[in-house]
Amino acid sequence: MSTPKAAAPLRAAAKTTPAAVRKVAAARTVKTARAVLGEVSDELRRTQLAGLQWTVRHAYEGSTFWQARLDKAKVAPESIRSLDDLQRLPVTSASDLAEGYPLPLVAVPVEDIVRVHSTSGTTGRRKILGYTRQDLADWTEYFARCLRMAEVGRGDRVHIAAGFGLWTAGAGFQAACEAVGAMAIPVGPGNMDLQCQFLTDLRPTVVCGTASGVLLLAEEVGRRNLREQLAVRTVIQGGERCSDAMRRRIRELLGAGHVHDLAGLTELYGPGTGIECRAHAGIHYWADAYILELLDPNTLRPVRDGEIGEMVVTTLRKEAVPLIRYRTRDLTRLVPGACACGSTFPRHDRLVGRDDDMFMFRAVSIYPGQLEAILSGVEGVSSEYDVTLERKFGKDTMTVRVERSPAGDPRTDEKTEAEIEHGIKSRILVSAEVSVVDFGTLPRSRDTARRVFDKR
């Protein structure tokens, strides 16, 4: 494996990925992954320790930021002797990337960076991440694993409705499609006439994009009555939380048999660091690429088994911008036990949300995912909703608007509103005013949907 000159001896010193895990890394099918069942757990722990040792030394010797941060924590690279030492390492966050703008936390010579990608910058200054050639090769392989786990490969045609350019999704999907031998159709988001033309003319078997973007496309297919002209069997979506109601709607409108949640974030290569398999019992994440911890967002201590915590990641191979205990802000829980699909990679649950999505209402912490869980169990409403928080007459109020489903009966709106209000009161312990509105009333987004509007 090629590395920058500064990194090569460090990777050798840490011992490269063990042979058994390399088999899994190169697995072309889930069947191949099953073949090394029994070897992986011990080998994976050794791989993670070797990768942790390499990452800490590589970051320390290649980056003044990491050197100062590790010195402050009184952690020397040679003192990392077990995975328990992970707890001694400092926690980092998005603010560390912002402070290092424009090329933060770089641990290789800038000349070794062959590409950059960027976050949207919607919550502050853009985070620009650099990639070496090896980083791009590793990311492509991780993303290709995702496609293979979704049973996408040679003979498939993949309609990529995700953004290209600085955003990671489009480029990641395209490289992964080519790696598994599928036909990439890089349409990008927007331009519904073109999207529908390619869906009906090229008849792709797979559609990819954000959950909101795919739903927007699916609703347009429904409006134009094109479903019978499609050949879609699989949807792969990520970039935001996707409720059960949204998944059902996407399957229904596109005629897809499976909708897979895809994991990833720009700081951690991009999308493709894990995916939901055909068993739909959690997201398998590539534990030979990064260590996942679930920490309490307030105390930064590990949560108990089965509890929801913030995903904190430490990369094991990333060259240009290694991450050490990086707070992703995403909330989930670990899924115990073996998966029915046979993969030996561990799983975490679908995302509950982000801890910075949480809002306070009358001293209660509320996540949008809690509302989505309630709405998903109510008949006659769609997956589209929004929440408006206001202060009226010295009192906080919460209004939830939810769209009636296309086949819903307006005469049942009052009953539906009462059912949702009761659900919010009994499960979240706050009172809200619910309004059922006509289907198509709420704004749609081709990217990540905004659900909460705080006007207090």
Image (cartoon, rainbow, N blue to C red):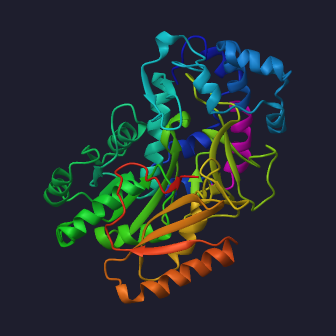
Majority secondary structure in the magenta region: helix
Say if the magenta span includes residue 441: no
Q: In the picture shown, does residue 315 fall above or below 405?
A: above
Residue at figure coordinates x 45%, y 60% from the top left:
260
Q: Nearer the viewer, residue 428 or 185?
A: 428
Q: Residue 9 appears in which quarter of the rendering?
A: top right
User: Residue 303, how many percent across, how many down?
Assistant: 79, 53
User: Residue 348, how many percent across, how many down?
Assistant: 63, 56
Q: Nearer the viewer, residue 287 or 74?
A: 74
Say if the magenta span includes residue 38: yes
Which span is picked out in magenta? 37-51
Direction from residue 202 to residue 209 in the image, left or right: right
Q: In the picture shown, does residue 52 fall above or below 201?
A: above
Q: Is residue 152 in view from this perspective?
A: no
Q: Residue furthest front?
A: 393
Q: In the picture shown, does residue 98 fall above or below 236?
A: above
How many numbered marks are there? 0
Direction from residue 454 to residue 245 in the image, left or right: left
User: Residue 73, how many percent across, how many down?
Assistant: 83, 24
User: Residue 241, how many percent across, how many down?
Assistant: 51, 57
Residue at figure coordinates x 57%, y 70% from the top left:
373
Q: Residue 419 appears in which quarter of the rendering?
A: bottom right
Q: Nearer the viewer, residue 246 or 51?
A: 246
Residue at figure coordinates x 41%, y 88% from the top left:
412
